[in-house]
């Protein structure tokens, strides 16, 4: 009979603007904090678009942050969104071919513009490249202030990895950081999943410092 491991729960910290490693994205972060007008964040997966939207919503009483996928499937979740203190819509590209949801979002954007309320939207591609999107919505999105988020460089990625580990109570040895960046996908989303696996394993093993051999034993099969 195999020994049953004790039940452990990983220590997650919710997204915040303070734990966003800026890298070359300072202008986007400053614009997000200023809450001016309509902003559009674009960039490939893993650059922090969702993190920034969720973090900003958490920091603002009365704010609302919705995913484009949820909006595409349930357009009425926008009911009342025109009056939210702050509104974020993630993954707007999910609204391609969903004209009802796109029309609802268009109305909300116009209402918030008239009221002088901020809205931030995101997608992997710039508005002009979202060919499947309702034309009027695409036109409105091209009028937003556009910020292109860039992937973290080597040092910024190391800083981010150490910061997120420390927030979980983990100390990553230099060799462990080297191993993770050499053998795992080098984007924050994938590395966050790896850190969660390490956190669970470290809690079970009652250790706070993660060495390269321990990381390899836990994550050796990770992508």
Image (tube, helix red, strand yellow):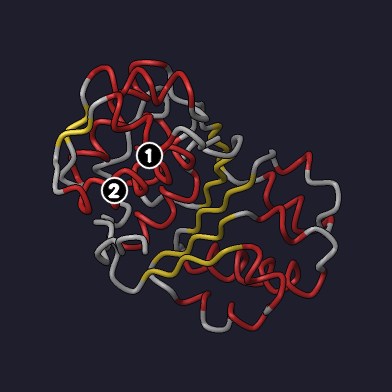
Position of the C terminus by quadrant:
top right
Q: Is residue 223 left or right of residue 13?
A: right
The part of the image, by quadrant, that contains residue 218 is top left
Q: Residue furthest front?
A: 1
Question: Is residue 208 placed above or below 172 in the rendered structure?
Answer: below
Image position, residue 170 (x, y; %): 18, 40
Residue at 33% of width from left, 46% of height from top? 33
Question: How crowded is the residue under tag 1: few (<14 C-alpha within 10 Å), some, or many (20+)?
Answer: some
Position of the N terminus by quadrant:
bottom left
Question: Is residue 97 placed above or below 187 in the rendered structure?
Answer: below
N-terminal label among 2 and 1: 2
Question: How crowded is the residue under tag 2: few (<14 C-alpha within 10 Å), some, or many (20+)?
Answer: many
Question: Is residue 174 placed above or below 198 in the rendered structure?
Answer: above
- The foreground one among 21 and 158 is 158
Q: Which residue is mark 2?
A: 201
- The foreground one among 143 and 95 is 95
Report if the CB atoms under discs 2 and 1 are less than 8 Å apart. Answer: yes
Q: Which residue is mark 1?
A: 218
């Amino acid at each position: 009979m195999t020994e049953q491991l004790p039940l452990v729960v990983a220590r997650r910290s919710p997204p915040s603007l303070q734990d966003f490693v800026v890298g070359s994205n300072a202008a986007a972060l400053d614009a997000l904090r200023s809450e001016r007008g309509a902003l559009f964040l674009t960039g490939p997966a893993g650059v922090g678009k969702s993190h920034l939207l969720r973090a900003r919503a958490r920091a603002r009483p009365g704010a609302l942050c919705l995913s484009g996928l949820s909006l595409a499937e349930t357009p009425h979740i926008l009911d009342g969104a025109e009056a939210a203190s702050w509104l974020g819509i993630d993954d707007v590209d999910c609204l391609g071919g969903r004209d009802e949801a796109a029309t609802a979002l268009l109305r909300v954007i116009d209402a918030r513009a008239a009221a002088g309320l901020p809205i931030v939207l995101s997608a992997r591609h710039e508005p002009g490249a979202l060919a499947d999107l309702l034309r009027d919505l695409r036109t409105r999105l091209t009028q937003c202030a556009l910020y292109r988020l860039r992937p973290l460089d080597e040092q910024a990625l190391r800083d981010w990895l150490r910061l997120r580990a420390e927030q979980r109570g983990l100390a990553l040895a230099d060799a462990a950081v080297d191993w993770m960046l050499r053998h795992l996908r080098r984007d924050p989303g994938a590395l966050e999943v790896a850190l969660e696996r390490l956190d669970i394993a470290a809690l079970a093993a009652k250790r706070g410092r993660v060495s390269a051999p321990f990381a390899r034993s836990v994550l050796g099969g990770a992508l």
